Amino acid sequence: MHNYLEGLNAQQREAVEHIEGPIMIVAGAGSGKTKVLTTRIAHLMNKGVDAFNILALTFTNKAAAEMKERVEAILGNSEARNLYIGTFHSVFARILRAEANKIGYPNNFTIYDTDDAKNVIKAIVKDMNLDDKHYKPAYVYNRISAAKNSLIDPVAYKEDTHIQQEDARSSRPMIGDIYQRYANQCFKNGAMDFDDLLFKMYLLLKHVPEVLAKYQHKFQYILIDEYQDTNPAQYQIIKMLGSVHENICVVGDDAQSIYSFRGATIHNILQFQEDYDDVKVIKLEQNYRSTQSILNAANNIISNNRNQIPKSLWTENVEGDKIMLVRTITDNDEGRFVADAITEMKLRNHYRNNDFAILYRTNAQSRSFEESLRRMNIPCRLYGGISFYQRKEIKDFLAYLRIIVNTQDEENIKRIINYPVRGIGKTTIEKILVFANEQNITMWEAMHHTAHVGLRGGAATAVENFVTMIKSFQTMLEKQNAYDVAFAVGKHTELVKDLYNDKSVEGLARYENVQELLNSIKEFTETPDEEGELRDKSLGSYLQQITLLTDADNEDEENDDSVKLMTVHAAKGLEFPCVFVVGLEENLFPSAMSLYDREDLEEERRLFYVATTRAKQRLWVCYATSRYRFGQLVQNEPSRFIDELPENHLDRTFTGPSNRAQGSVNAYGGTIGRSFNKALDKTTSLKKLADKIKEKKPAEHKPLGNFISDNPMDMEVGMDVEHIKFGFGNIKNLEGGANNRIATIEFKDGHGIKKIMLNYAKIRIVR
């Protein structure tokens, strides 16, 4: 084993070697916190602490795997495999698998993802004869999720005056009753959602003393990464588990606390010193990522927050280029500027596409950048699309696997009982559900009594055959691994055959996706054990692993040379040589929802701080003076955060795209504009630039002073209309109702065909 303490700076080394008692490591952006955490674990083990007595909690499986690999590399043996390292959800799921029967759940309980949970809520709303447009499943789910993360059960929810007043103000007084029914249904189904993995873990420790004592003595040393992102449930669980030994090490940065919308609270890290006696506090302030210029800007930004642990990032890196502050006229101009800038930087400085990231406040902002990049043939990757495991064909296949493991899972039975089609229609399903509810039994149990349910002929035979088929798969569970069972499911249900027979492009893609799923299961069964005592190749183990994957874990960036587009929230933990932080406008960044509360506004500022500290070498901060919202052009003011950037580290040489050729070369600072002709390839870049200058711009429309919009419902296909900005055109198509009427209009004078939201646009009928 090499000297693992070499290469640590003084503060990092102190954080590693101080192993007894509570310690808070305040790790600034890019200060090497992962290195400190992994070295600290290796140091504990080197000092004789058994790997089985160490618990390390992270927020992504990717981070957990990296930590385990690094510890193993330091120690040079396989002892790291015995560590309890994982996400809160995966570690607690692992414990609940062993202990769930003590709180009335089966040990093979199903884990519902967000879509599964919303489907259960949707069915409950329907059963209660409530309007699902008002009681939207997503809204109700978020209310229930917030309650669980705050350790509020259905009874407490309905007794809390403040919560009830909030629901009454939103005209949704029945959420408490929906929550109660939802909890009952999940329990009946033998299922937990993601939030339950925290909530039920808390209840297990609180109400079963012998389990609490068992894990308190097992986990003698506890380490928590990204402590600023913990919610009340995680906080309470950690306090209970660590109360015997109090060897708790939390690592985090209050300046990067940006997930309050998920229930995280900055107060957990701010009050850590009050929770324990003699807390050791170590600040990691040396940054190894960014230039000093970028760090000076970041320090200046965050200094405006009142609620914080004071610190100042510094670096031995070079001073670096100034931050480019870019003003454009419209959001489309902003998109074109960024695409032009990336093209120029690649030509001039030999950057690759994956050296660039475009960060925005909301996903809706991605359009102009995506279009501009693709227009210039720059490959880009948009984070936040539908993940592999959320695709219908994948969820269908997994539904079969889940009910084989847990037949109480009513939601997944309903999903595939008649897919592929086997003659079990809605009426048959409703009869089964009615009988199950009347007899207070599960849907699966009811399906064993087709005669009592009232099924006859083909319907009864179809249900009986389905039950027999599932039972035949269950006989494989003890002796066969996950892949063998999955392969049998694909073959005998004819699900794969059904997809294969669809020869459309979409059908082929769905078939290939299922093949990829089978490949992943095969890989799972052939991968050497890494998690010690509880890791196996069973179907149940596989289902738990893939259900707990986070978005970050699903991303495969190997050999992916593309510009990254993502929200600032999604960018946390990542770094890029060149970063564009865009849309720095009031009511957008900071969000309009945060302007009237200091805590909310300070979180928006922390979000901007996170955005700036993703950059290693170059940083652009961009804003547009006008932007389309709901079909209407809105004038914007620059974000207040721009005023918090230090003037001596800014380059404001670019002030707008009225002359795009000049703008696209002056945006890089210094003498680039003056040396432009010498640097560009005259047969390519100059030609493109000249073509841009020659582009024919649409004629500017000047409406009459008495312009008055007409009622959208008075408009018909074929009518001539006048738009206050785009001028005259003809309606080619209309869609939507009174509140969301959308017109497809072909405009004159070079504006082309546009889709206009009539309820928000200023438009009149030409009579």
Image (spheres, rainbow, N blue to C red):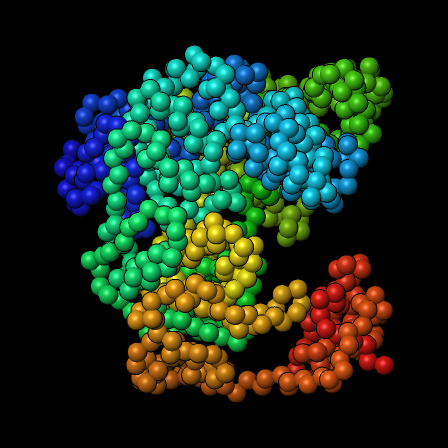
Q: Is residue 349 left or right of residue 114?
A: left
Would you place residue 61 above or below residue 9 in this image?
Answer: above
Q: Is residue 18 left or right of residue 742?
A: left
- Residue 689, percent from left and from top: 45, 82
Viewer can see residue 177: yes
Pick whichever, 245 or 388, lies toward us.
Answer: 245
- Residue 30, percent from left and from top: 30, 51
Query: Quick one: quadrant of the C terminus?
Result: bottom right
Residue 8 lies in what quarter of the image?
Answer: top left
Q: Residue at x 36, y 31 (%)?
A: 275
Residue 326 lies in what quarter of the image?
Answer: bottom left
Q: Is residue 465 left or right of residue 113?
A: right
Q: Is residue 764 left or right of residue 287?
A: right
- Residue 132, percent from left and from top: 74, 41
- Residue 76, percent from left and from top: 21, 32
Residue 116 lies in what quarter of the image?
Answer: top right
Query: Quick one: quadrant of the N terminus?
Result: top left
Most extreme residue toward the top, as rendered? Answer: 210
Q: Residue at x 64, y 28 (%)?
A: 159
Q: Residue at x 33, y 60 (%)?
A: 300
How many numbered marks does the figure carry? 0
Q: Residue at x 19, y 38 (%)?
A: 14
Would you place residue 663 above or below residue 528 in this image?
Answer: below
Would you place residue 57 above or below residue 712 in this image?
Answer: above
Viewer can see residue 347: no
